Image (cartoon, rainbow, N blue to C red):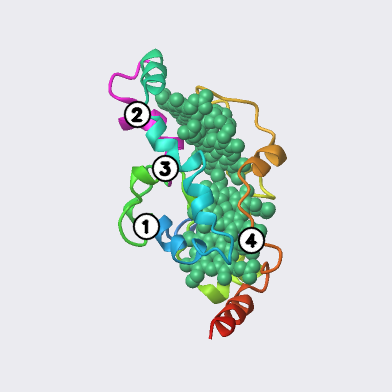
């Protein structure tokens, strides 16, 4: 009797754990920066696309082609080019090494470097305009909060990096700021309608 009950409880336990893992890992898929660009290159919303494009993260893959990178790789005993080594790509591109099922269509190209979804999470479900306009709904649809959660950054900014610099989360977040302008923050859809009406 006792063993039977224990087995039953254990069974439920496993089912719950398996369900939680599936929900966190499987459901939200990476879509790539071109999908975010559609809306986030607009001046009215703050053009986060250009801020990223002109910043360090967009160049993270390019950096691996530099002489400095080849030298670091050689010192670590890596025989091939740094830009082809898993030991380097893991932090210099987006969603490196993930199974094909993690992507909505094709895997993200290395050339994208460290793009939006490295910090904001896989965007298949939160990228819809109505979801995006609602913070809680976005988080429920898989959006991460990299301003609150330093682990998003320290997944790469850690001592495994051959050039590691101590990471002060609050200070580094400021260095890469790409805010939504205060006058449209939280009311963008409305602000867009107003802007359209003015044009007419
Ligand atoms: C269809 C248009 C659209 C697309 C596509 C889109 N966004 Fe957004 N995004 C918005 C709008 C609208 C807001 C809300 C602006 C407001 O009212 O404050 C927003 C807000 C955000 C915010 C702030 C959310 C918050 O609550 O703090 C982040 C972060 C963000 N988007 C990232 C992304 C990323 C990453 C992608 C690509 C995976 C993406 N967006 C794709 C329209 C879009
Ligand atoms: C997927 C890995 C990855 C994630 C996640 C990541 N970064 Fe980076 N970050 C890099 C790489 C790689 C570079 C170096 C890029 C280069 O020089 O080409 C870098 C460079 C920087 C720099 C430039 C200064 C420096 O240290 O050289 C700042 C600032 C920075 N990151 C802040 C952040 C913040 C803040 C977060 C979290 C919100 C974050 N990063 C998340 C990989 C990452
Ligand atoms: C290296 C990490 C990193 C990358 C790459 C990145 N972001 Fe962000 N993003 C952040 C952080 C950190 C914040 C600040 C969040 C906060 O204050 O809580 C932020 C904030 C935002 C916001 C909200 C600003 C606001 O005022 O609320 C939007 C919109 C956004 N990012 C869109 C994008 C888009 C689109 C891309 C790609 C083109 C992108 N981000 C790339 C880390 C990143
Ligand atoms: C654990 C994540 C991680 C791994 C693995 C990694 N990098 Fe980086 N890399 C970073 C981050 C983060 C930065 C930004 C500087 C730092 O480390 O704080 C960076 C910066 C760089 C830079 C720019 C120089 C500088 O001082 O900013 C070069 C070059 C570089 N990495 C080469 C490599 C090579 C070559 C490999 C493989 C042998 C590698 N990285 C592996 C995370 C990583």
Q: Earlier in the sequence, mark 1 or mark 2?
A: 2
The answer to whether the residues at label 1 and label 3 have Cβ atoms under 8 Å apart is no
Q: Nearer the viewer, mark 1 or mark 3?
A: 3
The residue wearing badge 1 is 103
Q: Earlier in the sequence, mark 1 or mark 3?
A: 1
Q: Residue at x 64, y 56 (%)?
A: 179
Task: Give the magenta range.
Answer: 77-94
Q: Is residue 119 visible?
A: no
Q: Earlier in the sequence, mark 2 or mark 3?
A: 2
Ligand 3 lies under 8 Å from the Cβ of mark 4: yes
Q: Quadrant of residue 143?
A: bottom right
The answer to whether the residues at label 4 and label 3 have Cβ atoms under 8 Å apart is no
Q: Nearer the viewer, mark 4 or mark 1?
A: 4
Image mark for residue 180: 4
The residue wearing badge 3 is 113
What separation in Å lies between label 4 and label 1 (alpha carbons)? Answer: 27 Å
Element at badge 4?
Answer: loop
The residue wearing badge 2 is 65
Q: Quadrant of residue 16?
A: bottom right
């Amino acid at each position: 009797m006792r063993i039977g009950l224990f087995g039953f409880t254990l069974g439920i336990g496993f089912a719950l754990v398996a369900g939680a893992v599936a929900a966190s890992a499987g459901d939200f898929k990476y879509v790539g920066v071109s999908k975010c660009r559609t809306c986030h290159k607009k001046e009215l919303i703050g053009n986060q696309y250009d801020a990223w494009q002109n910043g360090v993260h967009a160049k993270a893959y390019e950096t691996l082609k530099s002489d400095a990178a080849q030298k670091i790789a050689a010192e670590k005993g890596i025989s091939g080019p740094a830009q082809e080594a898993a030991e380097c790509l893991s932090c210099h591109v987006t969603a490196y090494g993930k199974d094909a099922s993690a992507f909505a269509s094709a895997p993200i190209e290395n050339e994208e470097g460290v793009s939006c979804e490295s910090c904001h999470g896989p965007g298949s479900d939160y990228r819809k305009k109505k979801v995006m306009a609602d913070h809680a709904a976005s988080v429920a649809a898989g959006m991460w909060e990299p301003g609150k959660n330093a682990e998003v950054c320290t997944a790469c900014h850690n001592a495994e990096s051959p050039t590691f610099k101590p990471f002060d989360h609050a200070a580094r977040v400021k260095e890469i700021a790409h805010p939504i302008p205060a006058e449209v923050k939280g009311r963008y859809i409305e602000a867009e309608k107003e802007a359209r009406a003015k044009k007419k």
